[in-house]
Image (tube, rainbow, N blue to C red):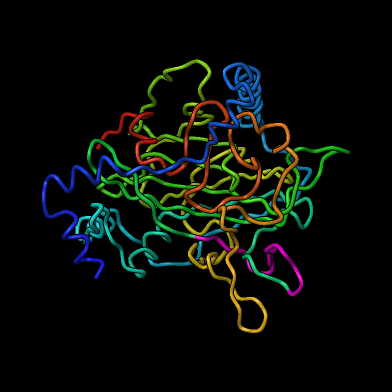
Amino acid sequence: CAKLLRDADLASANARSALLSAASVPDDYSTPRRFLGLYALTKIPFAAGVRRWQRETLAAFQREPGGQLNRVRYAPPAAAPLPRNAAAGLLARAAFDPLGQPVLSARELDRLAAAYAPSFEVEIGADHDRFGWLRWRRGTSFPQVEAAEPTVYVHSAYTRYRGQVLLQLVYTIWFPERPRRGAVDLLAGRLDGVVWRVTLAPDGEPLVYDSIHACGCFHLFFPTPRARPRRAPDRYEEWAFVPQSLPRVAEDERPVLTIASGTHYVERVGLVRGADSVVRYAFRSYGELRSMPRTAGEHASAFGPDGLVPGSERLERFLFWPMGIVSSGAMRQWGRHATAFVGRRHFDDADLFERRFEFDL
């Protein structure tokens, strides 16, 4: 039925034109909040705060790793190597959905996910630094992390560049909490997630990596030489913060992320070869988060109807609301990540990279 209705809607040029003109996707910014919060004025001190965070992040990337805390490196599951030409073949042979996006089978996605998966080197200060899979426990109103089995949630996504669709692979890890630092910590709270994404060229080579926390904050870009950043159009707008560039990534290399204790900030990205750790994480489909088992055979999503993870609210929401983001700091579902306080930017914007980078395809 859906196919018949789609074909009927797209049968004529007038119908297609009317459909395109009527299509409107609401973003995750509240214009009334920005109006009441005097956004035109308050964005100036917020922009200064963003620049301060960027300077602190650059300093962290330039520091040598400390030796005070235990570091554990988690490697991807063991898998057969996937040569670049084989990855390019998978992309070239993929069927396309009505939006022009390649449709990969579960097996094909598993092979690609294993081939481009990162390693995570995490500073372990306490249990809040051990990531795992999400589950509902009896009597709880928010999902909790089972860290006995380190787990990375994987799904595919797409971006558009000059009319061409590029495949992206997205990896998400969940920590039990971001612990409080001091009597008042605006950023502390239950659950903390780190999202890592790779955008692939049609030939299977990584073009650019980027990362956010699962709240949408702390957006970092890591371009290779095949992705050249464009200049920001406005001095206040959060555009594309690049704390580190990467060399071209060889077939037998993958990124390794250094993640700080407590804050779970990404503080460095390197490249490694081979089996770099005996500690391995498991893959799970990100789609599992939409329906997780509860008691008595019931299931419930990790996310509420608003796309937020219940119980993950942060105190920062009472201070940052003039920027127009509802409950800033709370963990969010894929597709609901506003990633800039100044300006409008979403992690899944179709033109996110086209506007900010020149790609060599």
**Image position, residue 233 (x, y; %):** 41, 18
Left or right of residue 32: residue 251: left
Can residue 339 be seen in this snapshot? yes
| Residue at figure coordinates x 12%, y 55% from the top left | 11
Of 90 and 292, which appears nearest the observer? 292
If the image is split into quadrants, where does the C terminus sit?
A: top left
Query: Percent from the top left, x then y, of residue 225?
Result: 36, 32
Q: Where is 132 relative to 37, above or below?
A: below
Would residue 79 appear left or right of 139 to someone viewing this image? left
- Is residue 280 something one can see in this rendering? no
Identify the residue at horizontal 23%, vertical 42% (top origin).
164
Give the dominant element type of the magenta stretch: helix, strand or loop: loop
Q: Residue furthest bottom?
A: 296
The reply to whether the magenta stretch includes residue 142 is: yes
- The residue at 64%/63% (across/down) is 132
Vertical arrangement, residue 200 with respect to residue 38, above or below: below
Image coords of residue 345 (percent x, y) = 47, 34
Side of 65 where 361 appears, left or right:
left
Place of residue 238 in the rendered image (x, y in percent of width and height, measured from the top left): 51, 26
Above or below residue 217? Residue 128 is below
The magenta stretch spans which residues? 138-153
